[in-house]
Structure formats: C-alpha cells, structure tokens
Amino acid sequence: MNKINNVIICGLGGLGCICGTAIKDSNIANLKILLDEDRYRKYNNQPTFFNKKKYYFDYILPDETNFNADLVIIATKNDGLDFAITSIKNFVNDNTIIISLLNGISSEKEIAKIYNPQNIITSFYIGHSSIRNNRNIFQDGIYEFVIGTENKKQNKDLYKLSNFFSNSGIKHRISNSIKEEYWKKFMINVGVNQLCASTGLTLKEIKKDTFLTKRLKDIIQEVKLIAQKEGIKNYNKIYKEALNFLLEEIEDATPSMLQDIQAGRKTEVEIFAGEIIKLGQKHNIETPLNKEIYNKIKELEQMHN
C-alpha cells in the first residue's frame, strides 16, 4: 500500500495535538486517538482546545480489533511508553509504520523489542515547547519533525511518511544524518531541560549567569563523552552545534521539564540524566553533573507531589 489512510496517535499532549489537529484539519486520513479507559471517559466529555480552536477527536480503546493502522504515532510522555507499546498491538500489522516522538534516545529500542525494527522510522521533534493547561494547549507554530533512517530498505516507508506529513501540513524534513541529529537533540535536552528544571529559570535567565552558562556547557560535555563511546560520528561537531543552538540561535525557552516541575508533574529525568548515568557506568565514564542534577530534580518532584 502506497498511501497512509488509517492513523493512530497514542498521546494527546503538545506533540500529539500538533499531529492530530493537522491530520484532522486536512481530512486526509481516518484518525483515531488511542486512550486508556480513564482518559477515554474524561476526553469523551471534554473537547481539546489547540491554539484556541475546539477539537473533538475519535477515540479508541486498546481492546478494539477492527482498525488496522498504516501509521502509529507514539507521542506520550516517557512514563506512558509501556502503555503505548502494549496498547497498539491490535492495530499494528506487517506494513504499519511506527514513529516515536518521545524525548531521549531509548524509545525506539524499547518499541523494537516487541515490533519489527524495519517498521520503525527514527524521528524527533525540535521547536518551541507547547504550553498546556488541562485540555487547553498552545503551540506557536515554531517547530519541525525530523525523520530519517540509516537503512536503505526503509526508504520507501520514509518517503511515504514524508508525503503524508506534507499533505497534512505537518512541518518536517528528512535528515541524511539522523543518528547524529538525534544525539544532538539529546544533548540539547539533557542540558537545557534539566538545568532549567533544577534552577526554576528559563534559558534566557540562565544565559545571564556566567556560572550557569558554564554549567550548561559542562552538562552537555558529559553527553558528548558518552556519544563518543556509543559510536556517534562527529561527536565534537554536534556538541558545538548543540551549544550554538542554545547560546546563540534561540533567545529564550521554557522547557517542558521546567513546566512539569511548576505544575507538579513527574519529569522525564530518567531518560535524560538517568540514561547518561547508566551509559556512564556502562563505559566507565564519570558523570558527576548529571548525577547531581538527577538528585536535585528528584527532590523537586518529591516536594511538588
């Protein structure tokens, strides 16, 4: 099949809404939002507002068996990944394309433990964070999804996905160096998400402080050392590009992890500092700053819960 007709999105936060509203507005596919029973009851009685526009989506539960997905978009937070992996089972077939929009570097590996790796296209989001208050979500339109593969056998699915995104108005581009860009995004997240969350400051405020600016560089330096051991080519180049993006290209940011702390939600520290600490142990590399920030964010989570 050369066309994507049936789509499932698992997760209706900021990224899920960017994709879901674009697909719904373009009316180019049969879209279902996959939910657990609690959210199903809640969302059926409450519309979603995205950029002040009201949306009613078609929801589906994991136990339904009459929907075959051509594309599955996993857009949960990290703590929803296990649910997503288990819940998409009835809707995935041999030809289903699966993408994960989760932060971090491990979600595709987790999905590939259950589903055919050949069906998984590497993808990530880069852009301004969404601001959300319950089912009211705002995103300023500055974003893109980056997709790519190092496996030429997946090129057909890659371009099928790209065509679908283009036809639905989802901003994206195909990367010819997806693995390096993937790790650069990870460097950015480990640095800015965690430092903002642990200090309660925005990126603009951090850049006004010489000590914190150096701390940002040093946190990302630990990621660079891990990337080198993980076989990432041009690790010095992507380290410099990550810093340039944060210190020169964007003026300010209120990252999602800072928003999570402010709202009393669980953060994604496990897939940032937690992952770096684990990989540091694997490669016998010291990661003291990520250990420090991990403990600090865990303390903040406890204080707000």
Image (tube, rainbow, N blue to C red):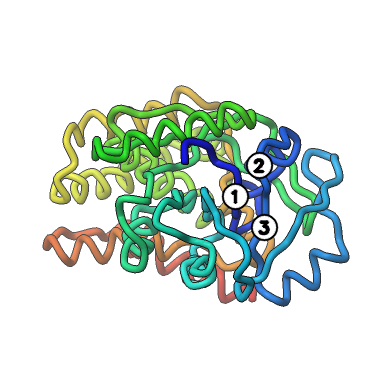
Residue receiving disc 2: 29
Residue receiving disc 3: 33
**Residue at 30% from the left image edge and 55% from the top image edge:** 117
Near mark 1 (Cα within 10 A), the count class, few <14, some 14-19 or many ≥20, is many
Estimate the x, y position of residue 47 in percent, counting from the top left.
85, 55
Total marks drawn? 3
Which amino acid, by three-letter code, is at mark 1?
Answer: Val
Q: Nearer the viewer, residue 40 or 26?
A: 26
- Is residue 200 among what the camera can see? no
Which amino acid, by three-letter code, is at mark 3?
Answer: Ile
Estimate the x, y position of residue 3 in percent, counting from the top left.
52, 37
Task: Tell me which corner region of the image, top left, top right, bottom left or bottom right, holds residue 21.
Answer: top right
Near mark 3 (Cα within 10 A), the count class, few <14, some 14-19 or many ≥20, is many
**Residue at 20% from the left image edge and 61% from the top image edge:** 280
Instruction: Choose the circle earlier in sequence order: 2 or 1.
Output: 1
Location of the C terminus (image quadrant): bottom right
Near mark 2 (Cα within 10 A), the count class, few <14, some 14-19 or many ≥20, is some
Is label 1 or label 3 in front? 1
Q: Distance between the Cα atoms at labels 1 and 3?
A: 8 Å
Residue receiving disc 1: 7
Instruction: Choose the circle earlier in sequence order: 1 or 3.
Output: 1
Q: Residue furthest front?
A: 1
Q: Is residue 274 left or right of residue 80?
A: left
